[in-house]
Amino acid sequence: MRSFLNEFHAEAGRALVDRGSELELALCCLISGGNLLIEDVPGVGKTTLVKVLARVLGLDFKRVQFTNDLLPSDILGSQVFDAARQVFTFHRGPIFAQLVLGDELNRASPRTQSAVLQAMDEHEVTIEGHTHSLPEPFFFIGTQNPHDQTGTAPLPESQVDRFLMRIELGPPERTTQRKLLVRDRERGGGLTFDFQSLRNLSSPAELLQWQGEAANIHVSEVVAEYILDLCESAAGRGWTLSPRAGLGLQRSAQSFALLNGRAHVLPDDVQAVFLPVVTHRLAQFAAVAGDSREAAGMGRTLVAETPVR
């Protein structure tokens, strides 16, 4: 896996400059079989990152632009009457893809946001009493703008908890911005990146295989107790983490170990994925609900004050 990771960084780096750690965490999330939330201001590369993942990993990709007038049927699909045959037929929505991007998720109404809950958790959707399975592997990646921007509606806690990880890209450093300016000039300016020029380095079948391998990465009792200590430390401060969070932390640490060529999980692997796994879950306990910066500080406090046994 380490050789693949190096090749992955090299290929993805053609489209995304200096975003290696964010790409690795996103890949870790997908290998864990989880959903990913990317929160940041517009224009920092959220959509580009998702398109790169889809192309390099060889996944069927669909994008849904979430707006305040978007309906659940626009995502899931609907029954349409066929006049010639005098029957209703199901027309599949964009949720029926291996990698689905919900762009600006928190600009839609809570009802529409909740339409993807079953898909995120069970990889199937139920429409008018009929259950339809989604393609495997299935990944949902949502992007959202910071909670204090106009025109946004907070995600329900039940949906936030279904995201295995949350990452943010942040504004590029000056050196990165310089690289972007140089690359834009070299491309002639005003030209979008040709994602089709990226090589497919993997396949859906290979991703499913990696998921199975990650699940078999050894987790010692010491590491398991460390995960439990972190969750209990949060609860002791009144910051309750769901059982899904603890399971997600273990799964993510297993995938991170796999990517880095190890057959067992280290406490360092748990710490590497801890903030992406818990920050969005801790945000509800921040002084200003939804404040991800304060939540990240809360997560760092837990890591700093919870010793490894």
Image (spheres, grey):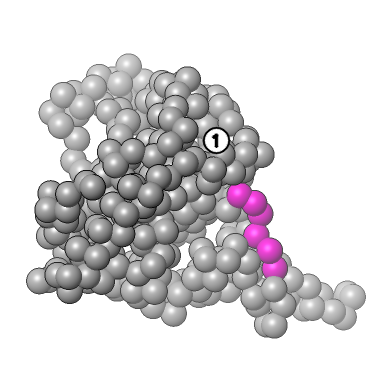
Nearest the viewer among 254 and 88 is 254
Q: Position of residue 265 (x, y in %)?
A: 39, 39
Q: Position of residue 2 (x, y in %)?
A: 45, 24
Q: Is residue 13 left or right of residue 135?
A: left
Query: Is residue 135 magenta-colored?
Result: yes
Q: Residue at x 42, y 21 (%)?
A: 6
Query: Is residue 53 magenta-colored?
Result: no
Category of crowding for the residue at label 1, using alpha-carbon neighbours closer than 10 angstroms: few (below 14), some (14–19), many (at least 20):
some
Q: Residue at x 29, y 67 (%)?
A: 241
Nearest the viewer among 20 and 211 is 211
SS state under label 1: loop
| Farthest right residue in view | 85
The magenta segment:
132-137
In this orientation, does residue 152 appear? no
Instruction: Reply above or below: 221 against 112.
Output: above
Please identify the quarter of the rendering in which residue 43 is found. Answer: top left
Please identify the quarter of the rendering in which residue 180 is found. Answer: top left
Q: Residue at x 39, y 78 (%)?
A: 110
Instruction: Reply above or below: 199 against 126.
Output: above
In this orientation, does residue 159 appear? yes
Nearest the viewer among 307 and 210 is 307
> How many numbered discs, if any?
1
Q: Position of residue 62 (x, y in %)?
A: 55, 51
Q: Position of residue 33 (x, y in %)?
A: 51, 51
Task: Look at label 1 and name its amino acid.
Answer: Leu
According to the picture, the residue beneath numbered tag 1 turns out to be 57
Secondary structure that dominates the magenta span: loop
Instruction: Reply above or below: 23 against 88.
Output: above
Q: Residue at x 69, y 73 (%)?
A: 131
